[in-house]
Image (spheres, coloured by chain):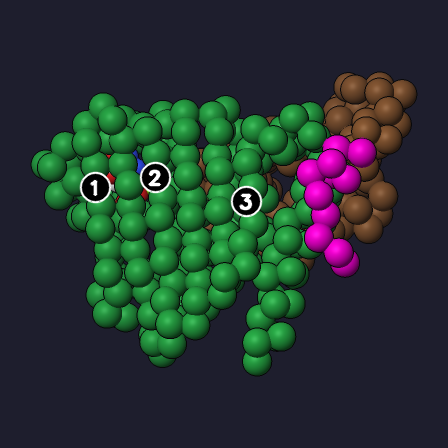
Chain colours: A green, B brown
Amino acid sequence: MHATLCDLITDLVQNAFEADATEIKLNVEETEKNLKVVIQDNGKGMSAETLEKAKDPFWSDGRKHRHRNVGLGLPFLFQTSEMTNGRVEIDSQEGLGTTVTFHFDPTHVDLPVFGNFTTAAITLMTYGFKGNLTIERSRNGMRYTLSRNELADALGDLNDLESLTLLKAFVESNEEELNHNDSDIL
Amino acid sequence: MAKMTLEELRNLRGSKKKEMTQRDGDKCAQIVIGMGTCGIAAGAKDAFDAFLDELNHNDVKDTRITQTGCMGLCFSEPTVEVAVPDMPRVIYGNVDAQVARRIVREHILGKSLVSDHIFDKPAQDIIK
Ligand SMILES: Nc1ncnc2c1ncn2[C@@H]1O[C@H](COP(=O)(O)OP(=O)(O)O)[C@@H](O)[C@H]1O
Ligand SMILES: [Mg+2]
């Protein structure tokens, strides 16, 4: 299992990168009672049969490594969900895309810690994915949006040190505002 | 820190970008971090944060950090490939935050390999 929920989310968005999507939306909505995550892509999708196989940790489609038959991204998601009474829905259509939705109970003792969203967002934005990735993040009603196209337009090469450093400051300032609001409530 | 706007981001980059073009581009060091399932599970993001922090701390400019999926070296994740001009291209294994900082100081700044973490050893004669 992944150590943090942000690691799990990163892994699932990478599945969308690997599915040759050109448009990906990640939505992370936190409230005191529920964590809802939606990862929507317009990539190659899965047939019902492939989706069944994908739930098996000892299966991978063989595109990354021809003889490798371990794929842990989706099994980690199901494992975490089962351990914490969460809910997972995967809606996928071959050739059209995939939407992975999950709901976790943030108060469940077995739920991994949330982790560092800033780092997750930066690594996803600079992964080398050429399409657009939109991240919508909200916490107790406060929200912000990041769009890879807009960031690339403002920064140019996203992978050089200056861009990465500015990107980090940018995401951190947005995250801080979410958390700031949090402490107002308490 | 007040919430930064996209416009502020653009302006900050605008001034930095000018600095950049005045330097020559081929001096750029490249860091490639393996960010597949195994890399992530082994802490590749901690390595990423440490690289960013240590590079800035030492004021190393002209570095690019990119990522790749699974490098197929799952047993030694996190793995990181480092290419510094005029030095052999090296793959390091088990790169935690501390090793990432050593790579910046010893390899990128000091121009000497972090030999105890080299995964894919280049020819024996170039490692002392
Ligand atoms: N968003 C997606 N779009 C299309 N196929 C997917 C998607 N997510 C997962 N898959 C399929 O499910 C398989 C298993 O995924 P996963 O459990 O993450 O392991 P891995 O990515 O290592 O193969 C993938 O190899 C791929 O064929
Ligand atoms: Mg995967």
For the residues carrying marks 3 and 2, which lies nearer the camera in this image? Answer: 3
Q: Residue at x 84, y 20 (%)?
A: B21
Q: Which residue is drawn at 49% across and 43% down?
A: A135
Disc 2 is placed on an element classified as: strand
For the residues carrying marks 1 and 3, which lies nearer the camera in this image? Answer: 3
Q: Which residue is drawn at 24% across and 60% down?
A: A87
Label 2 belongs to which residue? A40
Instruction: Give the residue type that dot 1 points to.
Output: Asp
Q: How crowded is mark 3: few (under 14 residues within 10 Å), some or many (20 or more)?
A: few
**Residues at marks 3 and 2 touching, judged by CB atoms closer than 8 Å:** no
Q: How far apart are marks 2 and 1 (CA)?
A: 9 Å
Q: Residues within 10 Å of mark 1 (few under 14, many from 20)?
A: some
Instruction: Give the residue type that dot 3 points to.
Output: Thr
Query: The C terminus of chain A is located in which quarter?
Result: bottom right
Label 3 belongs to which residue? A145
When asked about the image quadrant of residue A180, the answer is bottom right
